[in-house]
Image (cartoon, grey):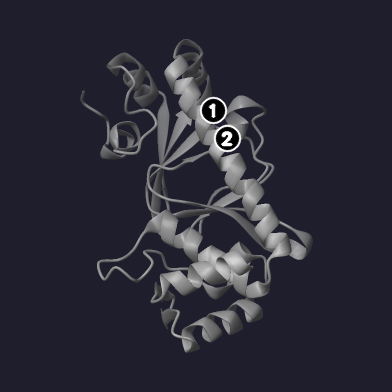
């Protein structure tokens, strides 16, 4: 099948794509009813309260999904990697975003039009079940993160955030450096703490030899101890 651009091909044919097993006709329908957007680092994909245009597939780059709290402070809810999907809730309910999303590096997204996608889901039980599984898994992760962010101590919360980043983005070629560059403020917002606390805790973990820090890059030098800190909370 010939695609209009390589980005929709990544979303539909990528190794971890939920759409990979669809028949060609349905893939063509999705490809014909999508829009492409290039998002620069720091720019919003969408903002809370805006109307959704459809399901978003991250074709390239990295994205954070967050909600603004008291005083405009962000709480990062999810980190998204390539071929990740954003917008299950608005796909199956209303068209208003309850969260915001921003690119943490230059990114490309494909917005899959809602109506055509819903029609495919209605006639394809396998795809519908895959979506149900994704939603169930994400709900489970969200429930666990809620407990962690409200009950764990600062060290436990930050250790868990570093492990989340590791598991989401993997390592650089050295097998130690997490393949993402985040500001200290973003790490704090992912860990439900102030930026100053995040800086102090990162420095403490680095002094103990558990992590290494070089600018915005963080390497995990002692996975066992970091996981132990996460479990202890």
**In the displayed structure, would residue 9 be above or below residue 125?**
below
* Closer to the camera in the image, 134 or 214: 134
Q: Residue 53: x percent and y percent? A: 55, 32
Q: Residue 122: x percent and y percent? A: 51, 13
> Do the CB atoms of the residues marked 1 and 2 lie less than 8 Å apart?
yes
**In the displayed structure, would residue 75 be above or below residue 60?**
below
Image disc number at residue 136: 2
Residue 67 is at least partly visible in this image: no
Along the horizontal axis of the image, is 2 left or right of 197? left
Along the horizontal axis of the image, is 44 left or right of 197? left
* Residue at disc 2, secondary structure: helix
Q: Quadrant of the N terminus?
A: top left
Q: Residues within 10 Å of mark 1 (few under 14, many from 20)?
A: few
Image disc number at residue 132: 1
Q: Quadrant of the C terminus?
A: bottom right
Residue 28 is at least partly visible in this image: yes
* Closer to the camera in the image, 201 or 26: 201
């Amino acid at each position: 099948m010939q695609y209009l651009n390589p980005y929709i091909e990544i979303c539909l044919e990528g190794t971890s794509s939920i759409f990979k097993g669809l028949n060609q006709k349905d893939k063509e329908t999705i490809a014909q009813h999508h829009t492409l957007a290039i998002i620069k680092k720091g720019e919003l994909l969408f903002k809370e309260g805006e109307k959704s245009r459809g399901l978003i597939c991250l074709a390239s780059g990295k994205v954070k999904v967050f909600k603004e709290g008291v005083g405009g402070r962000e709480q990062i809810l999810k980190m998204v990697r390539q071929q990740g999907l954003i917008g299950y809730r608005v796909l199956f309910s209303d068209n208003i975003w309850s969260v915001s999303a921003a690119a943490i590096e230059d990114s490309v997204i494909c917005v899959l039009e809602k109506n055509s996608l819903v029609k495919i889901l209605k006639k394809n039980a396998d795809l519908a079940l895959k979506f149900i599984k994704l939603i169930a898994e994400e709900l489970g992760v969200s429930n666990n993160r809620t407990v962690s962010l409200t009950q764990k101590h600062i060290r436990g919360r930050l250790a868990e955030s570093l492990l989340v980043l590791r598991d989401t983005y993997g390592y650089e070629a050295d097998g130690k450096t997490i393949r993402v560059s985040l500001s200290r403020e973003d790490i704090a917002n992912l860990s439900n703490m102030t930026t100053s606390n995040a800086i102090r805790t990162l420095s403490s973990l680095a002094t103990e030899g558990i992590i290494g820090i070089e600018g915005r890059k963080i390497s995990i030098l002692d996975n066992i101890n970091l996981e132990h800190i996460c479990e202890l909370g």
